[in-house]
Image (cartoon, helix red, strand yellow):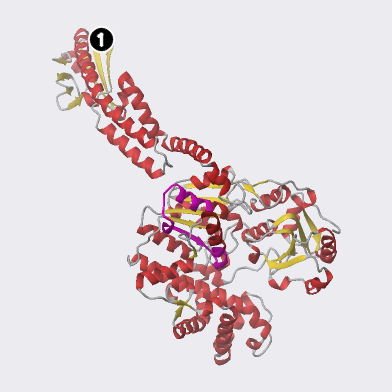
Amino acid sequence: MELKATSLGKHLAQHPYNRVRLLTAGVEVSGEKHEYLIPFNQLLAIKCKRGMVWGELEFALPEEKVVRLHGTEWQETQRFYHYLNQAWQQWSEEMSQISAGVLAQQVVRLKESEGQDRWLKRRDIAEWRSEILEAFSALPLPVERLDDFANCREAYRYCLSWLESSDAQRQKRNRAWSEKMVAHYADFFNTIETSPLNRSQATAVVNGEEAVLVLAGAGSGKTSVLVARAGWLLLRNQAAPEQILLLAFGRQAAEEMNERIEQRLNSEGIQARTFHSLALHIIQQGSNRAPSVSKLETDTSLRHKLLIETWRQQCSEKKAQANGWRQWLKEELEWELGEGDFWQDERLAKRLASRLERWLGLMRMHGGAQAAMIESAPEEVRELFSKRVKLMAPLLKAWKNALKEEGAVDFSGLIHQAVNILDKGRFISPWKHILVDEFQDISPQRALLLSALRRQNKQTSLFAVGDDWQAIYRFSGADMTLTTAFHHYFGEGDRCVLDTTYRFNDRIGEIANTFVQSNPCQLKKPLNSLSKGNKKSISLLPEAQLEALLNKISGYATADERVLLLARYHYLRPALLEKAKTRWPKLKLDFSTIHASKGQQADYVVLLGLQAGKEGFPAAARESVMEQALLPQPEAFPDAEERRLAYVAMTRAKQQVWLLFDKEDPSGFVEEIKQLGVPVLRKP
């Protein structure tokens, strides 16, 4: 059956199509120069219209395409439309039966997957989406028409919900599953640690994504979550003990974690390691040799001795070296140097040793040739950096020679070798789950090691706990963006937040949290306190009142309550402490730098040194060229890391904090802290 435009209609319409022919399962629309075949499986709608004189047929196609036929006699148009629509509808009903069967099978598969007793990962949903799209492509009916058929409608809408709002569906289903797990395994979550895990901790533990970052403020139970996570994997038979790798950033932290695992999980198969011990293990297994770690890495005095002796030798033997070092120390660090053989000054050498150690460590961490190191430096400091590298080159050479004579490697060399062995496939990772503590302290080099392990086995999950508010080790190579942009570096996954602190009271929390979050680069997260404080839980006090303050604390502090004095630098240790043992014999009094206090807590904290100046707090001294060239770019926000240092200091306290400031030359932080409502006391 066919329909043609009249001669006059064809002439007046001036349209490319003037004839339509009904086929077995479609229509053919044609003209003098054009022909368009429309199978029923691409036809969305047919409309029959009457114009001023002639009839019009309109065929709607996917992607909003329309094919029209004009200039046909109206009665013939109606008759053709009737037969065409009847044939199309009959075909559609037959095809809807087939489509309903395909959709029903897909719904069964989806519901079986959805009903599995496990976490739905993003990867699962991606696979589901592919399956749904594949099922849709196998249908004889256009997907846009499925909602018109009662036998297809429900199954189609169910598939469509997973296709169009899959992430929302996934989150909703995982929330329900998490609540079910937390309730069902209540005994586990109540007994895995000394006190029951709270809701945010428990839901973080059961999260089954392949890359999970748990953001945890000070005192919120990061290590408890890691231990519980290991226990959960064992409880659910997701891994054997030897398939779980726990990583800590220091030997002491790893040992403490091992003790907790042994106590809580009764398992010796899970062993917490440092990144360096992990690298050593990989080298031993992948190369059949057992490198030893140099004594230079474990003996600070030996390390400083080598660096200072080499530095002094270079300055005394080479005039160019002496002049270069004099210029560096005077112009960049603004240090006062004596005339003549300045390198023999013991105080200067002691002060410089830690700087040399830091710069050498950054060069070793980079690991490349000196030319490549210089080339990778920012253009604005490249020329000056080149001069600094030449001054450091003899120290780097002496370090390498010392390692060679000892037949040992340093920490940077360990990680470089381990990554190389992994990339060559000489070590096959046995770990299905990697758990990392204090993730905010990770460096690009350590991140490379993690990535190399996960490249070997795409199924390896990464579960990390950290706090970008406590990222205070940039000077040693830590890169906070690895935490703030976690999923960019380690793949799609989830971010969880531990929202309760068990350490400090709500007043300390309010001030510390607000202060650190004034930097917009810091990730926003709630941190609620269980205990109530008062307005004087945190206060500002002139530094001259330190002795009076300790006198007062000694009057009410109990024998087991600790008082911790914190400062930005070691040399700010108050001389007053020399007589502390006899002046306040029953006062449990300790001094520490803020950096060294990480992970500690005390009932009372006294933060010293809130003064302005180059080495005040915040320190006004700018970074050296070595640090500008070899460290990640600093944040644009002023005093970003110093602000985090202050946060760490304040959150060591369980009960009370005093911030001691210089009345004559106060730190810029003092006024800002006042604006937060912290009272300024005249005396304790």
Answer whether residue 439 is visible to the viewer in this image.
no
| Label 1 sits on residue | 53
The x, y position of residue 614, in whole percent, is: 69, 69
Q: Is residue 246 magenta?
A: yes
Residue 163 among those drawn in magenta: no
Residue drawn at x 46%, y 61% as measured from the top left: 447
Using the image, determine if residue 21 lies above or below residue 509: above
Q: What is the x, y in percent for residue 618?
A: 68, 63
Q: Quadrant of residue 16?
A: top left
| Amino acid found under the numbered disc labelled 1 | Val
Element carrying mark 1: loop
Q: Nearer the viewer, residue 406 or 494?
A: 406
Residue 10 x/y as whole percent: 18, 17
Q: On the rendered structure, is 421 left or right of 344?
A: left
Residue in the picture at 14% in, 21% down: 24
* Quarter that holds the C terminus: bottom right
Residue 182, given in percent of the width and then of the height, sits at 52, 41
Left or right of 607? Residue 281 is: left
> Can you name the residue that lies furthest to the front here?
266
Magenta residues: mostly which secondary structure?
helix
Residue 22 occupies quadrant:
top left
Residue range in magenta is 226-255
Nearest the camera: 389 or 503? 503
In what quadrant of the picture does the N terminus appear?
top left
